[in-house]
Image (cartoon, rainbow, N blue to C red):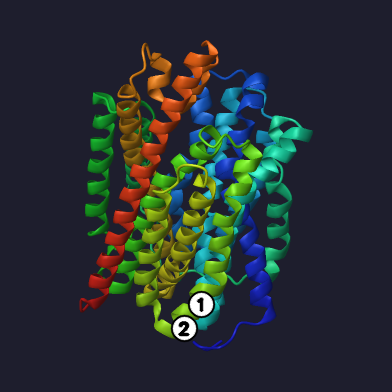
Amino acid sequence: MTTHSKATPREWWGLAVIALPCLVYAMDLTVLNLAVPALSRALAPSASQLLWIIDIYGFLVAGFLITMGTLGDRIGRRRLLLIGAAFFAAASVLAAFARTPAELIVLRALLGIAGATLAPSTLSLIRNMFHDETQRQFAIGVWITAFSVGSAIGPLVGGWLLEHFWWGSVFLPAVPVMVLLLVLGPRLLPEYRDENAGRLDAASVLLSLAAVLGTIYAIKAMAEAGPSAARLALLVAGLAVGWVFVRRQRVIDYPLLELRLFAIPTFRTAIVAYALSCLAMFGVYIFIAQYLQMVLMLTPLQAGWATVPWAGGFVFGSMVLAPRMAARYGPGPVMVWGLAAAAVGMLLMVGADGPWALWVLVAGMVVVSLGMAPVFAVGTEQIITSAPPERAGAASSIAETASEFSGALGIALFGSAGTLIYRHQLGGAGLDDVPAQAEGTLGGALEAANRMPPETAQALVSAAQAAFTDALQFTAAVSSVLVLLASVLAARMLRRPS
């Protein structure tokens, strides 16, 4: 196959096969949240155990991304993907029938390690399967769409399963998908490895795990419980280990993290745009889900449907807008103007209040998704094509790690800022004897109101909802500024000579 040759039907069928596990991967990040009440009744986990059941999957996905991306370059990307699929299927079956909280925590950890093979392996395989630029951008759009659709349908599929089956059933949809990948993958997917790769550096693996896990855990812990000396110490320790890891990558022959990639202007620009976009989007999204259910008082299913246009915007933007705009205007302008459009969408969310709040919020979400989708599609294509083919796995793992880090940081920073605004506004609402439970979260305020006389309860609920709306609007405004800054930075970086 030459550099600009078109893909054959085999490549397109292969793309369909690798899109399915990406969809399941995204579903597994959200679907368990719905099962928490039933899971709590069945297994009776402690508060700490429940937190680990929910979070351990995402922690280990983030922790192993860098290692798995480089490992795929060494042993073969298809081989690593199939190994991960086999482990994912087996762990899903076992998790569905877990009998104790400890068993479920271990199995969720195994799912996270297996899940870390999916994103870098599938993305780097696309790099080798689609050599025509337009087709490759479309293929990456399909890849991004799989994640978007998985996130959107996760709550819907999970809700239906929980209505008809036991809590563990939410793990089972992954099994037939992974079995299909194991059957069709060897026939449809090419193998690619770096024949000149050296030995995997064990010290770098341990340092990367310690840095990523320590930093992300500290950030999420501070987002949930606020800063403390221990959490700040863990954050500093994680960053220090990260510094040691980066220093080591400069001196070893075959590094786990290829720092030379950051010297490439297109790679550097795409990573910066990707990271800032994820930081802003994750930060505002945690408020949207709560706003829909606890301010607009939608049911979980109605809230799920309200986010479908958001996912639809990503589908259309990734598969239609991105390839056409990139072909006409070039990848750089598409990223710059896509970020600017997303900033406008987040600014629209600032007006989400009053009788038209739902429609204004949905409109803002759609504009954000239409602006962000080309950024992610084109930016991802720039990341994996600016790297040498033998390092595509490492490049794609850098993109995914940047996403995980930025998402965790966005949740921590915006979550903490939103909580401060909520408490300040609620404290200034003129209410007498606000319960401590209500001062922490909007959910706590609604729960406290259930134990109050009707008139007092209504005053508390109204004040708490107004305070939370202020927090959402502040978050949306700051996110808009942040994404606009990403647009300006991308424009400046692209003008700068290499």
Q: Which of the pair 20/192 is nearer the observer?
A: 20
Are circles 1 and 2 on residues that touch, CB within 8 Å?
Answer: yes
Write the residue at 57% across / 20% down.
45
Q: Quadrant of residue 409?
A: top left
The kind of residue tagged 2 is Ala
- Specify whether 406 is left or right of 165: left
Write the residue at 25% across / 53% down.
246
- Above or below: residue 47 compared with residue 97: above
Whole-percent x, y for residue 95 in the image: 65, 34
Secondary structure of residue under mark 2: helix
Assess disc 1: are there few (<14), some (14-19) or many (≥20) residues with their C-alpha within 10 Å of its C-alpha.
many
Secondary structure of residue under mark 1: helix
Whole-percent x, y for residue 271 in the image: 34, 62
Q: Which of the pair 89/468 is nearer the observer?
A: 468
- Above or below: residue 298 compared with residue 130: above
Write the residue at 29% across / 68% down.
490
Judge whether residue 498 can be spotted in this image.
yes
- Specify whether 247 is left or right of 471: left
**For the C terminus, which image quadrant?**
bottom left
Whole-percent x, y for residue 206 in the image: 36, 44
- Above or below: residue 169 compared with residue 126: above
Residue 356's label in the rendered image is none
The kind of residue tagged 1 is Pro
Judge whether residue 25 can be spotted in this image.
no
Q: Quadrant of residue 80?
A: bottom right
Q: Residue beneath label 2, please?
A: 327
Q: Residue beneath label 1, please?
A: 323
Query: Marks 1 and 2, how far apart in space?
Result: 6 Å
- Above or below: residue 303 compared with residue 50: below
Write the residue at 44% across / 71% down.
378
